[in-house]
Amino acid sequence: MAQGPAHEPQPSDAPQPEARRWRGAFCPRRLLLWIALCLVDGLAVAWVASTIERYRAPVFLFSLLVGLAVGVTLAGLLRLAQVGHRPTLLLGAALAALTAVTGQHYIGYRVAHADARDDARAYQMARMALGDQVLGQMPVPPEGFVAFLRWRVARGYKLFGRHVRGAAVWSIWAVDALLVLAGALVVVIAAWRRPYCNRCHSWLAVTRRGEIDGRLARRVGAALDAEPPGDIASARYWLATCRGGCGPTAFELSWKKPGGGASSVKAWLDAERRNRVLRALDGELDAGADSERNG
């Protein structure tokens, strides 16, 4: 049964002269596409975070989780859009994080005004029913997003049992924004470690993988000019290429010994060596299929 690869192919696995070619080059069209995707992603995460925040949002921890959510969704989008230029990815991640933070504050502003309108209607109905016995009224937030933020800062709120306002609120919001940014960047930087092909503008992806027996592992090892040991309990392989098959193919063969312990061999295969490995795999697999049919 097919299994996932031990790890994804990394640029560091390639020979040093080849490593630089696997970094994405700048492309203006992909920059514009990436910025648009990041802005939409930031808005979507802001909306979801604002909805969850009404129920439970541990201070600081929630901001880090929002940042990780931004990063995970961007990691999927950069694969979907095939954007590989690292400064472009960093710029987009920063914009997405900023949009997520600002979006949460703006949604809070809209919700506060909606609540204020509901409170005003309830207040008027209470006065009509009870007359002068109704005293007091909920504070009404000012119009305008910036004015609302200043109003929130001036009023403050409770944090860890203490009422904070003024500069303390600005500082807390700044830390929240940095945590969102940090969470997003950690995931995006981890996602771009996979090699990227500038010829067909695509990330290398695992196109074939699976488990094989010891006999086939030794046959594949011979095609790689490697010599796996004779006693192999189990083995598996993966093969990764870019979308257009433009350059070398990343390949790894790993195996476990009966008594424990594991080893592997990694290589970048040119067309000739790739064909040798594929013939070794397909020849043995086809023979196994024929024997099953004959049996």
Image (cartoon, rainbow, N blue to C red):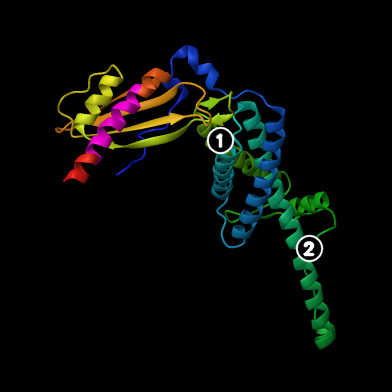
Closer to the eye: label 1 or 2 = 1
Q: Amino acid at mark 1?
A: Val
Q: Nearer the viewer, residue 284 or 95?
A: 284
Q: Position of residue 62 (x, y in %)?
A: 56, 50
Q: Residues within 10 Å of mark 1 (few under 14, many from 20)?
A: many
Q: Which residues are magenta?
A: 276-289
Q: Nearer the viewer, residue 126 or 46?
A: 46
Q: Circle 1 is placed at which residue position?
A: 188
Q: Is residue 209 left or right of residue 137?
A: left
Q: Are marks 1 and 2 in contact (CB under 8 Å)?
A: no
Who's the residue at 71% across and 50% down the image? Answer: 103
Q: CA distance from mark 1 to mark 2?
A: 36 Å
Who's the residue at 59% across and 41% down the image? Answer: 77
| Vertical relation: 131 (above or below) 279 | below
Residue 35 part of the magenta segment: no
The earlier-in-sequence mark between 1 and 2 is 2
Numbered marks: total: 2
Most common SS among magenta residues: helix
The secondary element bearing badge 2 is classed as: helix
Residue 288 part of the magenta segment: yes
Q: Is residue 242 left or right of residue 48?
A: left
Q: Position of residue 16 (x, y in %)?
A: 46, 13
Q: Residues within 10 Å of mark 2 (few under 14, many from 20)?
A: some
Name of the residue lying farthest toward the front: 294
Name of the residue lying farthest toward the bottom: 129
Work out whether residue 62 can be spotted. Answer: yes
The secondary element bearing badge 1 is classed as: helix
Work out whether residue 158 can be spotted. Answer: no
Q: Circle 2 is placed at which residue position?
A: 113
Q: Amino acid at mark 2?
A: His
